[in-house]
Image: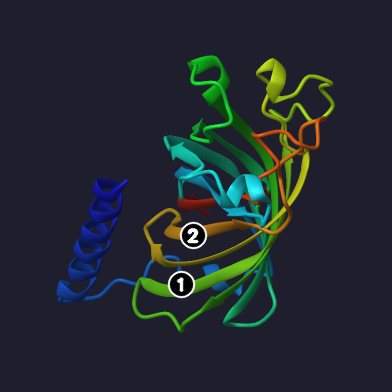
């Protein structure tokens, strides 16, 4: 992920230097921002994890470890569409429905859980239908570049959810909710090219609601110590409009 971020920064710097180095600056797509409504698509990568808050139960306090749950992250992908509506010269309302997929591995370190792989390890796949509604605030255009910040909220449906499964962690099933809400914030730059506008951006994604489904047994050593369990992630999107 660090290598990807460094590559993007280098790409943006090189692109900016090329634009500034032009003796005769050519403005591409001069009428692009006059459109009231336009469409596009995006591709990207994500690195998701979870924010975990423990409650004040005696199980959490007396567990003998400060790290009851370890998270192994992995890279995932994003793909989706863009519907952009111009509110004024510097503010756009955007709808960016798409898919996001990623898998995490949880290791439960609670000493009250049997010390076997089938009891301590949980694979948590996550394929989400994301429906973000965002506001994009852009600077004035400088030649063929325009910086922006973006933010908003999203409804996320988890296709990988096993919320309705009657089995729980006692049968090896870690359950998460189907319907979730996120907020996201990010920064990026619009690069006006000859045929299209290319917009790389980096965004933070944060769950609002608690995504975990408690085990059927209220004294479960897997879910009792957890007060909040929500997605946190970094998304890198490459948008073409």
Of label 2 and label 1, which has the lower sequence position?
Answer: 1
Residue 175 vertical position relative to residue 116 in the rendered view, above or below: below
Residue lying at 84% horizontally and 21% vertically, measured from the top left: 166
Q: Residues within 10 Å of mark 1 (few under 14, many from 20)?
A: few
Callout 2: 10 Å neighbours few (<14), some, many (20+)?
some
Spot occupied by residue 224 in the image (x, y as percentages of width and height) = 70, 42
Residue 180 falls left or right of residue 199: right
Q: Mark 1 points at which residue?
A: 30
Q: Residue at x 37, y 57 (%)?
A: 194
Q: Please say if 31 is above or below 50.
A: below
Would you place residue 213 above or below residue 204 in this image? above
Give x and y (percent) for residue 94: 66, 63
User: In what element is the residue under mark 2?
Assistant: strand
Q: Quadrant of residue 221?
A: top right
Residue 64 horizontal/vertical position (percent): 47, 45
Residue plotted at (53% across, 54% down):
241
Q: Seen in the image, is 191 located left or right of residue 36?
A: left
Q: Horizontal placement of 24 versus 196: left or right? A: left
Q: Which mark is residue 203?
A: 2
**Would you say residue 100 is visible in this rendering?**
yes
């Amino acid at each position: 992920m660090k290598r990807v971020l460094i590559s993007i920064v280098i790409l943006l710097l090189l692109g900016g230097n090329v634009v500034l180095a032009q003796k005769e600056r050519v403005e591409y797509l001069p009428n692009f921002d006059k459109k009231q409504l336009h469409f596009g698509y995006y591709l990207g990568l994500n690195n998701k994890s979870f924010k975990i808050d423990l409650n004040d139960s005696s199980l959490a306090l007396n567990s003998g470890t400060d790290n009851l749950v370890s998270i192994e992250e992995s890279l995932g992908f994003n793909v989706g569409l863009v519907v952009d509506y111009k509110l004024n010269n510097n503010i756009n309302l955007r709808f960016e429905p798409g898919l996001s997929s990623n898998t995490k591995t949880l290791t439960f370190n609670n000493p009250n859980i049997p010390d076997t792989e089938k009891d301590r390890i949980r694979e948590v796949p996550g394929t989400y239908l994301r429906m973000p509604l965002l506001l994009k605030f852009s600077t004035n255009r400088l030649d063929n570049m325009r910086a922006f910040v973006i933010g908003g909220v999203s409804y996320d449906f988890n296709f990988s959810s096993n919320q309705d499964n009657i089995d729980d962690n006692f049968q090896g099933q870690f359950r998460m909710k189907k319907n979730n809400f996120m907020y996201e914030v990010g920064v990026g730059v619009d690069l006006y090219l000859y045929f299209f506008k290319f917009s790389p951006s980096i965004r933070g994604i944060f769950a609002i609601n608690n995504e975990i489904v408690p085990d059927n047994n209220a004294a479960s050593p897997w879910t009792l110590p957890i007060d909040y369990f929500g997605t946190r992630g970094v998304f890198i999107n490459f948008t073409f409009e």
